[in-house]
Amino acid sequence: MSGPKRTATRSEHALEDLDGAALSYAARFAGQPESRRRDLREELVQLALPFAGRLARRYRGRGEPLEDLEQVARLGLVKAVDRYDPERGSFTAYAAVTITGEIKRHFRDRTWGVHVPRRLQDLTIEVSQATAVLTSELSRSPTVAELAARLETSEEDILAALESAAGYTPASLNGPVGDDGPAELGDMFGALDADLESVDDRLTVSGLLYRLPARERRILAMRFYGNYTQSDIAAEFGISQMHVSRLLSRTLTWLRQAMLTDAPPRWESGGVGQGDTAETLTMSVERTAGKILVGVHGELDRDAAERVRVGLTEAVCTAGDDEVLVDLDGVGFIDAAGIAALLASHEAARRATVRLRFARAQPYVRRSLTVAGLSPLFG
């Protein structure tokens, strides 16, 4: 027993003969005035609207509202009607291609949150469809190799498509992180390192610092890393605050010059800047009854160390039974080379069985000599 017959609606009959309606439209369109042409065009568009709607519904569920897809499909339908040429074949086939292309263009140009090349966009859609099919067939998620074999492409392309899929709806930087608290995703990203641009300068300066004498390096460290005042530094070294200021000025001037040249200039202990009045080391020898008094005045650094060693050794060798007393009151600074010179004179005195003593050393110099083991010579 057959069931009740279904009565076809007028719109279904019209859609079945959409190609015939398009041919009739094209035949009547050529000889009509402009106002009549608009009416004929409107009639064909209205007749084909359900067809455009069916094509739009094929793409629902992909993140775009159906109403937007229908509007895009109708725009494609209007373009198909305006460009239709009966000599090129079926209107239905031409309209389907035009509408589908318009919808795909909409997805490509308007829905991606991040720009992705068209080839990867199309491949992303194919990968998504192939993933759904293979998941149903295999009862598990397909591997990259299985997707590549299914789509007949390379695994590298599949990986690029999977990575590009994240660009369709990227996460907002203002999105919340977790369920509690006001933190946003953007708060998780680190800020630009303001010191990054100065890395090259820091490396250059660190290399140049090793070219400076030990005293200048220590003064710079105390001033700019230890936050010592010039007065504090002067008390530490047993020199005047004005002398510390001159040393800092001379050192910073040399560093600036060295930073601006490929070959750093030679460090001159006597000064490299205008107005530098650092004293050159001087020695005086005075003989009295039973004693040779050697006065040293200036900075006992590597440039003056050899002169002091020679002078004290000569005094020891000519002392005979006399005592050699070295007055260090005028020495404001001594480095490793200067300490080595005093140790050499002490060794020469020991071999010659001559008594050698140091007197009136300033606090910084005395501490340095004590560390070097020369404290027994103070008297």
Image (tube, grey):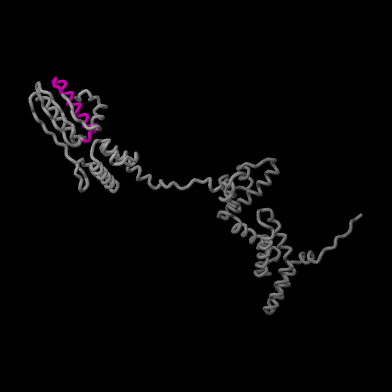
Residue shown at 63%/50% (left/top)?
126
Q: Image quarter for residue 299?
A: top left
Q: Residue furthest right?
A: 1
Q: Position of residue 129 (x, y in %)?
A: 66, 49
Residue 334 counted in the magenta span = yes
Residue range highlighted in magenta: 332-355
Q: Nearer the viewer, residue 146 or 191?
A: 191
Residue 120 counted in the magenta span = no
307 horizontally vs 189: left or right: left
Q: Position of residue 287 (x, y in %)?
A: 8, 28
Above or below — where is 192 with respect to 6?
Answer: above
Q: Which quadrant is home to the N terminus?
A: bottom right
Q: Nearer the viewer, residue 26 or 358?
A: 358
- Residue 309 visible (yes or no): yes
Magenta stretch secondary structure, dominant: helix
Q: Nearer the viewer, residue 293 or 96?
A: 293
- Residue 214 visible (yes or no): no
95 horizontally vs 341: left or right: right
Above or below — where is 46 with respect to 230?
Answer: below
Residue shown at 20%/24% (left/top)?
377
Above or below — where is 367 with respect to 321?
Answer: below
Q: Which quadrant is home to the C terminus?
A: top left
Q: Position of residue 222 (x, y in %)?
A: 31, 38
Residue shown at 26%/38% (left/top)?
234
Q: Position of residue 227 (x, y in %)?
A: 34, 41
Q: Image quarter for residue 252?
A: top left
